[in-house]
Image (cartoon, grey):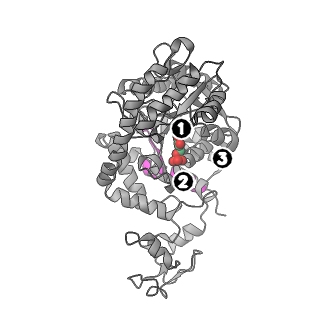
């Protein structure tokens, strides 16, 4: 195994001091892919372990005389005419298809409005392709969290965070109140308090935020985004320690209320403070409605104040992530990446087609909001959290109605399936996925819930 690079740029940024034991250790050894890349134009290339050559081109209906990775002929029929089997049968690069990575970066700049910022290209790492947003969260948490270290999350969170952070990585999950009980807005003060607390105990803070949120469906307004940003910057400035903000953008683009911010928090955080390090985690699963494609991306935001060669820093980050990928998934699905790339070659059309789905979801959202209003009984501690985006709404329940009991009763007696959410921190409620209910089912579904809560 080749020895690790010395990461000259990364070592001189606060990212380095925030790395976990794994994060410090990992790199991509100069192995088979390295030598295969070097030998690409060699007269004879006997490097990589895929069967290839030009002998079968005619039989495989490949219109070239070039050496191709052999494939089983009927794959072509399954793919149709738009994707050439000879281009997707081979392994994809460890860090993902170069063209897809570059297109996704352009897409990030466009959808976040960052495009207008001077020198922005160098302040964003080149997105690295992973197997969905789940995989992105896993790799980045692993890069920063050693066993026993803490990730801070809002108390209403996607259940899989526990599986990733706790069960897989051995980290702790600490939480703050998602909503201020009085204002019903995102509890920025609770977040700051916990960031400061953790920052005093740990050499860094790893904060994981998700908007539009699962399970509540909450998306902050631009003013709230600005407050969250200010609070993070203030804490990082005071602590003088890196604050890594993992921005889980799984539901980016799904906002149904014109007062809510469509742009990712990532856009607010990039280059705001040298100790604030935003990492954008997004993907095709929801954003391009290609859940099964397993195409996600990891993109770091850099600080212009670090005084390092940002191109080298990008290479260092990609090297670390590539080591993590090579040792687990080896590389991502070539065909899935190709499909996403083809969708992105005409992104305007893909987004226009996606709008049809957003329109349906907006209708469902509007019907849900109206029908759900009578379920709110704050005096009985039964109430929805604020929701204006994403795929869900969250109904809080009093302690004497355990969410799992209600969910079981709803299923057994009313034939309605919902997800109960109960946490050690005291969250008790049900997540209702209105994204999967036709408009006609929404009223009856909420009536069923009301009947059991009466
Ligand atoms: C908040 C959140 N993050 C990440 C994911 C995972 O996305 P992916 O399917 O791309 O792994 C989900 C999916 O349910 C989610 O709700």
Mark 2 C-beta closer than 8 Å to ligand 1: yes
Q: CA distance from mark 1 to mark 3?
A: 16 Å
Residue 43, disc? none
Residue 14, disc? 1
Q: Secondary structure at mark 3?
A: helix
Name the one closer to the observer, 408 or 252: 408
Q: Residue furthest top?
A: 379
Q: CA distance from mark 1 to mark 2?
A: 27 Å
Q: Would you name the residue on which mark 2 appears?
A: 131
Q: Position of residue 380 (x, y in %)?
A: 56, 13
- Could you classify mark 3 by the number of other residues whose Cα lies within 10 Å: few (under 14), some (14-19), or many (20 or more)? some
Of callouts 1 and 3, which one flags the residue occurring earlier in the amino acid sequence? 1
| Residue 63 part of the magenta-drawn span | no
Residue at the image position 54 percent from the left and 18 percent from the top: 382
The quadrant of the image that shows the C terminus is: top right
Name the one closer to the observer, 101 or 367: 367
- Could you classify mark 2 by the number of other residues whose Cα lies within 10 Å: few (under 14), some (14-19), or many (20 or more)? many
Of callouts 1 and 2, which one flags the residue occurring earlier in the amino acid sequence? 1
Relative horizontal placement of residue 231, taking residue 202 as reference (left or right) = left
Q: How many marks?
A: 3
Name the one closer to the observer, 453 or 64: 453
- Could you classify mark 1 by the number of other residues whose Cα lies within 10 Å: few (under 14), some (14-19), or many (20 or more)? many
Residue 233 seen in this snapshot: yes
Relative horizontal placement of residue 131, taking residue 256 as reference (left or right) = right
Of callouts 3 and 2, which one flags the residue occurring earlier in the amino acid sequence? 3
Residue at the image position 48 percent from the left and 60 percent from the top: 336
Occupied quadrant, residue 65: bottom left
Q: Secondary structure at mark 2?
A: loop
């Amino acid at each position: 195994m080749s020895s690790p690079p010395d990461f000259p740029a990364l070592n001189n940024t606060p990212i380095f001091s925030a790395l976990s034991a794994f994060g410090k250790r990992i790199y991509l050894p100069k192995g088979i892919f390295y030598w295969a890349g070097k030998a690409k134009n060699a007269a004879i290339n006997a490097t990589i372990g895929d069967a290839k050559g030009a002998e079968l081109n005619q039989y495989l209906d490949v219109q070239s005389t070039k050496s191709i990775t052999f494939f089983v002929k009927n794959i072509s029929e399954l793919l149709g005419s738009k994707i050439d089997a000879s281009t997707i049968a081979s392994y994809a690069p460890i860090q993902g298809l170069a063209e897809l990575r570059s297109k996704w970066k352009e897409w990030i700049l466009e959808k976040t409005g960052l495009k207008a910022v001077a020198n922005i290209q160098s302040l964003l790492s080149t997105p690295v392709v992973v197997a969905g947003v789940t995989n992105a969260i896993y790799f980045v948490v692993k890069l920063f969290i050693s066993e026993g270290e803490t990730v801070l999350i809002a108390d209403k969170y996607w259940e899989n965070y526990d599986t990733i952070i706790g069960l897989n990585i051995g980290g702790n999950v600490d939480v703050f109140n998602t909503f201020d009980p009085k204002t019903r807005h995102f509890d920025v003060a609770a977040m700051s308090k916990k960031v400061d607390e953790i920052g005093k105990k740990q050499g860094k803070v790893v904060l994981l935020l998700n908007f539009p949120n699962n399970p509540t469906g909450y998306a902050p307004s631009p003013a709230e985004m600005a407050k969250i940003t200010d609070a993070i910057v203030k804490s990082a400035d005071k602590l003088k320690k890196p604050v890594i903000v993992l921005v889980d953008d799984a539901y980016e683009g799904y906002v149904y209320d014109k007062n809510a911010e469509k742009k990712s928090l990532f856009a607010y955080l990039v280059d705001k403070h040298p100790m604030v390090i935003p990492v954008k985690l997004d993907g095709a699963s929801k954003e391009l409605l290609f859940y099964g494609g397993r195409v996600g991306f990891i993109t770091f935001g850099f600080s212009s104040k670090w005084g390092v060669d940002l191109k080298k820093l990008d290479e260092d980050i990609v090297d670390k992530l590539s080591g993590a990928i090579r040792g687990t998934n080896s590389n991502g699905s070539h065909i899935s990446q190709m499909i996403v790339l083809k969708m992105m070659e005409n992104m305007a059309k893909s987004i226009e087609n996606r709008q049809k789905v957003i329109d349906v979801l907006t209708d469902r959202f509007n019907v849900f909001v109206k029908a759900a209003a009578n379920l709110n009984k704050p005096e009985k501690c039964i109430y929805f959290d604020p929701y204006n985006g994403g795929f869900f709404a969250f109904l809080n329940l009093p302690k004497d109605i355990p969410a799992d009991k209600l969910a079981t009763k709803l299923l057994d007696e009313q034939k309605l399936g919902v997800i109960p959410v109960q946490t050690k921190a005291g969250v008790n409620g049900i997540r209702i996925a209105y994204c999967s209910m036709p408009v006609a089912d929404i009223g009856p579904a909420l009536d069923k819930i009301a009947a059991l809560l009466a």
